[in-house]
Image (spheres, helix red, strand yellow):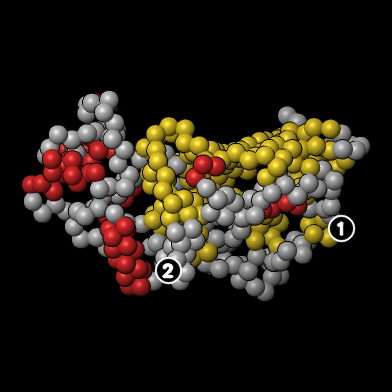
Amino acid sequence: MMTRFLLQIVLILTSVSAFANDGAFFAKGNQLIPINETDITVKKEILTLKKVRNQVIEVTVYYEFFNPKEDKKIIVGFEAFSPEGDVDGAPKNGQHPYMRDFKVELNNSVLKYNVSYVADSLYNQNGNIKSLDLAKFNGNKSGNNVDFFYVYHFEANFKKGLNIIKHTYNYDVSGSIDYNYEFEYVLTAAKRWANKQIDDFTLIIDVGEFETFSINKTFFKNSNEWQINGIGKTEDIKGIKNSFIENDALKFHLQKGNIVFRKKNFKINGDLFLYAQNYLGIQDLGYIPFSYYQEENIAEPKNDLERKILKNLPFARRGYIFQNPELSQFYKTMEWYIPNPAYKPETETLTEREKKWLKRWK
């Protein structure tokens, strides 16, 4: 298995050198932060990230903040990094071009917000936002590398004691020649609140069914810090300096369900980076990716056995134990394969996409 994995890396690196580093970074998720100094603390956060149709990340955040003193009004902000690559970073309707449906609700009241354009981290002037006038701005304000980023900001009236904020938005999924998809979330920004941590943190990630993806070991160390709600398994990936995979990571093979990370007194020392490696450069059926969204990269079958292997992919995804020795031997070598003795292959239970796949290989 390790030999096959290394072969994939070599072939991917070859492809990358040929195609360059083409791709599009659209946006990343981020924490709400206090624009001015505050003694308010983050008691609890439940962060849910959901990938939809391999195109959009839906973000839902539930916060519990504690204000130890009298009622106060502060400016709270959300820093949205500008797009880069094969994209246009110019504002769309005054907002980030690849973020939508931004909404903040404080203690059951929906808050109005403004969007500013800022060129550096020193945009906070005594609790107020120093915003660029793009009409007079001399830097790049359109194209694939703009010289500013976006700050969504609003006034928040925190009462004494517990305050609840519900925050939602979505953004386009980034991708490149390296990654079928990738998305990031800036966890470390939460340290700007008074307690410099999140007292009770929960992260829920739902990438959809039949996906292989990795998360860099930046804010966690071991697989036992994660819970799989559903069917799946993990494997440790060792990063190699100056290679395609530079950082140690935890790879997930998720048949269905979601993954959950929980931590009390969470002193954040790294940000979330999740990626699904692109399956490129393989000219035969030495390996078949788990994901629906990489099926187009699978090589055409060269004989009847390979055609039979492809036809049975939907059943292998669900853990069918093959009686045919050649099919059994092949799928046992797939890192994502999870045998399920109880599974009975029934075409009616497959997705419409998989039914079309079966017809293709009749």
Instruction: Give the alpha-carbon distance from disc 2 to disc 1, as whole Å.
Output: 44 Å
Looking at the image, do the residues carrying marks 2 and 1 touch, with CB atoms under 8 Å apart? no
Where residue 340 appears, as percent x and y from the top left, is 29, 31
Specify the amino acid type for callout 1.
Asn
Point 27% across, 47% down: residue: 334
Precedes in sequence: disc 2 or disc 1: 1
Q: Give the position of the N terminus as an image quadrant.
A: bottom left
Specify the amino acid type for callout 2.
Ser
Residue with the most extreme left position: 304
Badge number at residue 126: 1
Is 202 positioned to the left or the right of 22 in the image? right
Badge number at residue 243: 2
Badge number at residue 313: none
Image-quadrant location for residue 328: top left
Where residue 317 appears, as percent x and y from the top left, is 29, 38
Point 28% across, 35% down: residue: 339
